[in-house]
Image (cartoon, rainbow, N blue to C red):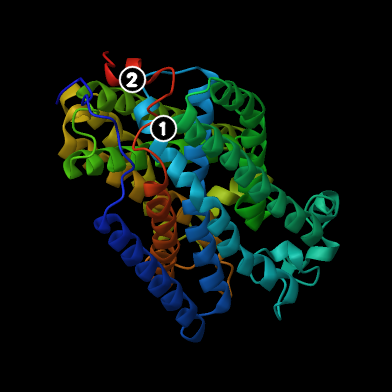
Amino acid sequence: MSTHAASAPVPLVADSSIASSANKALIIGLVGIALTALGLFVSTPTAVALSWLVGITYWTAIVIGMLMLVLIHHIFDASWSTVIRRQWEHGLASFKWLALLFLPLVLVSWFGGHHDLVWPWMDPHHHVHGGTVGTDILYQKKSGFLSREMFTGMTIAFFIAWVWLSARLRKASFSQDRDGDLKWTMMNRTTAAMGLPIGALTLTFAAIYWVKSLEYHWFSTMYGVWFFANCIRGALCFGVIIMVWLYHRGDYKGILNTNHLHSIGQLMLAFTVFWAYITFSQYFLIWNANIPEETFWYNLREINFDGAPNQWKWVGMTLLFGHFFVPFFFLLSYRFKVTHRIIRGIAYWILLIILIDLCYNILPALKDAHGNPLPFISLNLLWVLTSVVGIGGVCVWAYLKSFPTAKLIPIRDPRIGESLTHHE
């Protein structure tokens, strides 16, 4: 691949294939959403709602990762990632649609027949551990934090923060293409300086409210960092997929070189190790302390109440090897990181495993009459897939609709020259 940009100016990328692809993505998304809604007539409302939670959390995590990578790019004044940054900026257009798609979960918690349809602590009469949520001392101690009012207000605040930060980043970046004014670079650095702590806090609390609170008895001080690792890995993987797609379309020829792929591959390797470190540390500390208020979360995902192993034990083993060992050993190779077909395959694999990881954290909240988690391989998995496809179709549509609205790359960014000639 060439290491030099084409001498011709970079145009707005507007062609019929992009518009057609956007329409197809939206149709696929709407079909996926409709199929998920049909699940309400085939399965239990709780199963469908939790499957929707998996889908919305999965795609929100990926877009949060894009936001954090753009913020990190600006705070470090990075050069190599400038030609890639624009595609993450287009991905940020999904946030307002994700907020809309999250709305049904909030509404059902307020106006549904059962307020505990998703999160059990929303109904004080929900039966838990031989009593009710309202009489549970652990809930009483957390009730100021775990309330419908606080949950709703915080969720609204999360999306407002993400949409606002995204709007500032996109406005400055796109505006600089027109006038080349350095004030837009300074604006993005200011946004990054305040956006990184805002992003870190909001993604942490989102993970706690949306996912961790499904088992509100459980304690973990590493949950936000685990979620952050998955956010960044998901965004990096989508970055690879988009880069390879644009290269083979012809848009990135003369722009993308092997060193860009190698650099993003190095980050994928780094966050693979980071995810493993966080996940192992959480498991080891809980295992070593052996406190019932913490160990039950893992016991639930290994054995049933009668001592028999359940399917979630093997899901956990899949995460151990699929989330760490497989991508780790592949990403050690320079050749694998710069070969389009291989690095794209690794990216698809990691995205699949991130989805399984979220299933591992969310779906065991579905329990039978004996308190055992429902099996992973069941009809409920179908609603997870339709949710992921439905919400994903809307996110891809939002990206493709934003794609023609700006130059392919930030042509007047002060670092664009260094990025086009990036070397290891």
Disc assigned to residue 48? none
The quarter in which the C terminus is drawn is top left
Q: Where residue 262 sits in the image (x, y, percent)?
A: 26, 24
Q: Is residue 296 left or right of residue 34?
A: right
Which picture quadrant has residue 248?
Answer: top left
Disc 2 crowd, CA 10 A, few/some/many (<14, 14-19, 20+): many
Q: How many marks?
A: 2
Q: Which residue is mark 1?
A: 85
- What residue is at 14 percent from the left and 26 percent from the top? 1
Q: Earlier in the sequence, mark 1 or mark 2?
A: 1
The outermost residue toward the front is 179
Q: Which residue is mark 2?
A: 419
Q: Nearer the viewer, residue 130 or 384?
A: 384
Which picture quadrant has residue 276?
Answer: top left
Q: Nearer the viewer, residue 86 or 266?
A: 86
- In this rendering, is residue 38 above or below 417? below
Disc 1 crowd, CA 10 A, few/some/many (<14, 14-19, 20+): many
Which picture quadrant has residue 169?
Answer: top right
- What residue is at 37 percent from the left and 21 percent from the top? 416
Q: Is residue 416 left or right of residue 256?
A: right
Q: Secondary structure at mark 2?
A: helix
- What residue is at 44 percent from the left and 31 percent from the top? 177
Q: Where residue 15 sits in the image (x, y, percent)?
A: 27, 53
Q: Where residue 72 sits in the image (x, y, percent)?
A: 51, 25
- What residue is at 58 percent from the left and 32 percent from the top? 285
Task: Kindly report the distance in space between the C-alpha atoms of the residues bearing marks 1 and 2.
Answer: 11 Å
